[in-house]
Image (cartoon, rainbow, N blue to C red):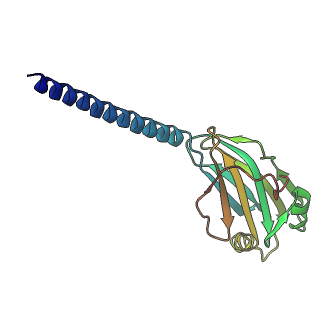
Amino acid sequence: MRLNSDYLQAFGTLAAAIAALIALFVAWDQGRVMRQEIRASVWPALQVDGFSTQRDADIVQGLNIQNAGVGPARIDAISVYYQDALVPDLEALSELFPGHTGRSATSVTGRIIGAGDTVEVFAFQAPRAEDDDAVDMMYDLASNYSVDVCYCSVLDECWIAHTSGAATPKPESVDACPVRGVSQL
């Protein structure tokens, strides 16, 4: 009789251990799912787009950054390249737009861009010549310029959004934003 009692006790202990392991797995899985939901609820997604447009008698060319995600984005670094060479600052960039009669710029490094917000980083305005076409000028911009914008979420998860030619690849996940090789914009 004692032998059956020992088996029942061992079986009960084994069943309790299995139930505890199942509960531990369920708790771990729930925590993982909750972390993913939190990350998704604050995920920023920056879109970096050059533009060229005709406004009255002028051509305006520049760069917009839009947060198409659901959470705020902190911009930590921006790098502008002309023919694969880093453009160090707004003055050097301004020299690449000869004949411009007006310019505007907004400092974006360290700035928070809310979900759905758009920032015009810079724009150069020049008188439109008779043969100027904004679409052709946009293709010229896309073939000569590229931009990298490194940004982070409120959870300090970071990405680099790239533009390169006509294609805009999806943002690349990075551990941290670079501190060197960035434009002073």
The percent position of residue 156, horizontal first and vertical second, equals 65, 41
Residue at the left extreme of this rendering: 1
Q: Is residue 59 visible?
A: no
Q: Residue at x 37, y 33 (%)?
A: 24
Residue at the front extreme of this rendering: 2
On-image quarter of the N terminus: top left
Q: Nearer the viewer, residue 14 or 129?
A: 14
Where residue 86 sits, quadrant-wise, is bottom right
Direction from residue 138 to residue 25 in the image, left or right: left
Placement of 180 over or under 134, stated as above or below: above
Q: Nearer the viewer, residue 5 or 184?
A: 5
Q: Is residue 120 visible?
A: yes
Direction from residue 38 to residue 18 in the image, left or right: left
Residue at the bottom extreme of this rendering: 131
Q: Residue at x 83, y 60 (%)?
A: 125
Placement of 165 over or under 181, stated as above or below: below
Where residue 157 sits, quadrant-wise, is top right
The percent position of residue 35, horizontal first and vertical second, equals 49, 38
Where residue 8 sits, quadrant-wise, is top left
Placement of 181 over or under 25, stated as above or below: below
Q: Residue at x 70, y 52 (%)?
A: 150
